Image (cartoon, rainbow, N blue to C red):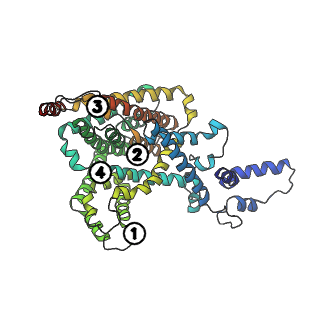
Amino acid sequence: MLALAAIHDFRLLVPQGLIADEQTTTSAAQDGENEPTESEAGHTVADPHHSGGGHSDPVAPVLLGIVVILLAAKIGGDLFERVGMPAVLGELAVGIVIGNFALLTGWHVLEPIFNLPNAYPDPLPHDPKELFYNTPAMLDILARIGVILLLFEVGLESRIHEMMSVGVSSLNVAILGVVAPMALGFGAGMLVIPEAGWQVHAFIGATLCATSVGITARVLKDIGCAQKRESKIILGAAVIDDVLGLIVLAVVSGVIREGEIRLMGLAQIVGLSLGFLAVALILGAVQLPRAMFRGASFLRGHGLLVVTALVICFGFSYAANMVGLAPIIGAFAAGLILEGAHYREVGKRWENNNLEEALSPLSALLVPIFFVEMGVQVELASFQEPSVWSLAAAITVVAIIGKQVCSFGVMEKGLNKVAVGIGMIPRGEVGLIFANEGRKLVADGEPVINKGTYSAVVVMVMITTMITPPLLKWSLTGKKSAADEPADETESNST
């Protein structure tokens, strides 16, 4: 039924110019018989307020796009989870299939919904309706909100006191896990695509800084090793790594926008990034979130916990954008300063006072849209260029090596350093977020991350995410660290 509806609505979804051209060609072939006037053709195809049919509402193709994305994402995620892989890879894979559906099958039926390159014309139209009624642009907006929500959740899962409790080792691992991949990624870019500007090389290095906290944490939990000392170091370092990585992202993006590396400009960007995070932490320390939740507790109605949290999240995201930083940095900072105590004690009369659970339905809608849209942007045709394969191979290798370097930051003796390095490998959703930010940047009139480079980065993200679960399981369950030996000896002696 959905397929029939999609075919029935195809004329409404196809861009106006394409239908107009088809009508002109058909009319010419029929020697001008029954040629529609320009106003009639425009009214039939493009007028969103036309009331002649049930399918003229401009939200209809957007809803169809959401249906396709959610069904495909859940099926793809299930298939990958059945073979022990993260669901995010399945969502990314189905996005690649959707984005290259015409190339793979010869059918162009999905292009009007997901063909994003022309979604945002430059300059933007003066009439908001021209942009609002653009289906790919609407799906892209939903994906952008989804990634903000995703970073907010990453921040919620991160605890500042936990970062501090793991000590010097996690800090060393995190710093090495940013510096080494950044340098290696920059070098790999210079070697494989020397014709690209320094901006491209720098952003490739910045993308390799990322570490997926969520994927690593889930693997550690699944294999029952979450309480090991190595696991705590990995998770603490991964959170610090994300904070440092977002600062690197802000700095690299700012320098690229400036067009050149200037010492004063660089210092200003670094200071702005650190200052924003510092202000966010101060607002958390002075209990601003607690005050907001306390005020919301006096209101009547449903969903006050989620609404208050989203006000904080979106407010911080907007503030980050206003000072020249990516909105995702504000979302992460908002999640970072929220503690359970801020809302649980003042929201006891709310039906659900677990914020993570309350946000899960919204995440289930918007986050898959982001991952599928990231897959849609991959052009399989770009792999016809040997340089794309070379770049994908090079950055994948240095992405793995760079995170192994960070294992030298473990200061305690007897710990499994190999496991620490492996746990930092997966780029997952954070790597995709970084690559997506690069697609938005323009240098010398061209996107910093073009189609070929983006496709290579996605390959790197998928490989590093796929190899981590089995390698981490092998490294932690196949070996015993010195930290585990005393406990084993104590148990044997007591026996």
Nearer the camera: disc 4 or disc 1:
1
Q: Give the camera-side residue of 366 and 388.
A: 366
User: Residue, x 34% and y 58% (percent of image)?
Assistant: 355
Nearer the camera: disc 2 or disc 3:
3
Label for residue 302?
A: 1
Quarter of the image for residue 240 reads top left
Dot 2 amino acid type: Arg
Q: Distance from label 2 to label 1 (Cα)?
A: 43 Å
Quarter of the image for residue 45 reads bottom right
Label for residue 257?
A: 2
Residue at the disc numbered 4:
272
Q: Give the camera-side residue of 429 and 350.
A: 350
Q: Distance from label 2 to label 3 (Cα)?
A: 43 Å
Q: Distance from label 3 to label 1 (Cα)?
A: 45 Å
Dot 4 amino acid type: Leu
**Relative image position of residue 306 (x, y in whole percent):** 37, 62
User: Residue, x 61% and y 40% (percent of image)?
Assistant: 101
Number of other residues with Cα within 10 Å of mark 4, as a class: few under 14, some 14 to 19, many 20 or more: some
Residue at the disc numbered 3:
476
State left or right for residue 276 relative to residue 376. left
Dot 3 amino acid type: Leu
Q: Earlier in the sequence, mark 2 or mark 3?
A: 2
Q: Earlier in the sequence, mark 2 or mark 1?
A: 2
Q: Earlier in the sequence, mark 3 or mark 1?
A: 1
User: Residue, x 47% and y 48% (percent of image)?
Assistant: 368
Quarter of the image for residue 168 reads top left
Q: Distance from label 2 to label 4 (Cα)?
A: 15 Å
129 in relation to 243, above or below:
below
Q: Do we see residue 59 in this rendering?
A: yes
**Relative image position of residue 329 (x, y in whole percent):** 35, 50
